[in-house]
Amino acid sequence: MKKFFVFSIVTYLLFIINSSAIADNSNDNLENKKILKVGVLLPLSGEFQSIGESFLNAIQLALYDISNKNIKIYPKDSKGNALSSYQSAKEFEEQGIEIVIGPIFNESLERLGEINKITFIAFTNKNTQVSNNIIAFGINIDSQIDVLKEYFSKIEVSKTLLLYPKSEFSNQSQSVKEKDILKFYRIYTYDTNPKKITGEIEKITKYRERKKDLERRIKILEKSDLYKDKNELKKLEQMHTLGSVNFDSVVIIDFGERLKSVLSSFMFSDVSSNTVNFFTINQWFDKSFFNENAMQNLHFPSIDFNNLKKFNKKFIDSFNKQPLEVSILAYDALGLIYYCWSNNNFQFKKDQLYSKKGFKGLHGEFLIEDNSSKQKLKIYKVSNNKFVKVY
């Protein structure tokens, strides 16, 4: 029973998708085929070394799970900059390597378009202005907005605010704003200074007007001796404002402490997540959200959480340390390359990466189109110290 369980998990991880071709090839046949050379371009020294090592470990984990001696990986140091990435890529070219996993950062891609004999599976989530030989494999904003649109239709929200900080996340925010897929009711920017955020949210929610409405109503009721007015007064004395806001949902494009500040400001302005739906973008299941009351019922799109937990456990068991959650994409990148190679008579062809049937990796289903991975994401919410899938 244990052997069957392991086999079913491993075959899933190795992209047994839409085909049984891999299962039909014996180990003996694999041994006799030519070597698959895969370059790995990651920051393995300097400021971002720990990030690069987590990605490299994830690739090594995938290599172990595939268990095929004909696959060879060739790691090189990108140092997290464009020049070192270009120099390492030129060395890959001299070695006859046609497919490279990496680099991680968008800035490292600057000159890689010049090396058109190599296809790079990069982990940037920015899918604009990418050269034809680069696939943006990160969790991009388009995939997130697509699943949010589907979920919005399900829960029937009609007046959605878009909020994003001034001068930051401009590419993601502009993409969401210009495409207008979610048909925003209002669009606001807010100051990146946390001390100013509360005041700006008060204006958006018309907090002071609603507070004054409450005070006026209480004064009127205090003069009445009617039983129903006294009952209403008791209820109003427990409230902070009177009247509802003119929106039913909010999408906030932000991260970390500032996202927490924005949501806390909504709570301070007497706008509850029980009456308004709050959404943000992929947060990679940040557990620090559990410590904030304002984060309760916050929704966000992301990859398959159950599979991420399996990946994390396997990674910890293998390397005795926590992985970066995003490094699951590196695991899937090698699985994708192996799947395409083994299903094409053990020859790598770039065109196979663009199969219209799509693929299913550990992070979920995806389709590579227009030099970008289009992921089929899920929607989760924060609830009682858990991440709960709602769609």
Image (tube, rainbow, N blue to C red):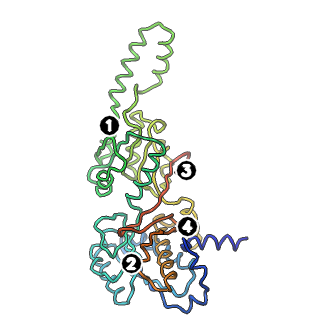
Return the disc, 2 or 1, that comes first in the chain's sequence.
Answer: 2
Taking 102 as reference, is 280 above or below it? above
| Residue 222 picture quarter | top left
Q: Position of residue 13 (x, y in %)?
A: 56, 71
Residue found at x 30% / y 77%? 112
Which residue lies at the image location 35% right of the left edge and 34% below the top edge?
205
Q: Identify the element where label 4 is drawn.
A: helix
Decide: few, some or many residues near mark 3? Use Cα within 10 Å; few <14, some 14-19, many ≥20.
some
How far separated are the C-alphas under marks 4 and 3? 18 Å
**Res 225 visible:** yes
Q: Residues within 10 Å of mark 1 (few under 14, many from 20)?
A: some
Which residue occupies the extreme top position in the image? 225
Q: Which of marks 2 and 3 precedes in the sequence? A: 2
- Please report the residue visible at 43 percent of the width from the left and 44 percent of the height from the top: 278
Question: Dot 2 lies on which element?
Answer: strand
Residue ID for mark 4: 311
Who comes first in sequence, dot 4 or dot 3? 4
In the picture provided, is 147 more to the left or to the right than 173?
Answer: right
Q: Earlier in the sequence, mark 4 or mark 2?
A: 2
Distance between the Cα atoms at labels 3 and 2?
A: 35 Å
Residue 41 image label: 2
Please provide percent x and percent y for residue 325: 48, 64
* Residue 319 appears in the rendering: no
Judging by the rendered image, the residue that carries numbered circle 1 is: 204
> In the rendered structure, which amino acid carries the disc numbered 2?
Leu
Q: Which residue is mark 3?
A: 388
Q: Amino acid at mark 3?
A: Val
Q: Secondary structure at mark 1?
A: helix
Is residue 207 or residue 377 the one in the foreground? 377
**Observer-nearest of 232 and 244:** 244
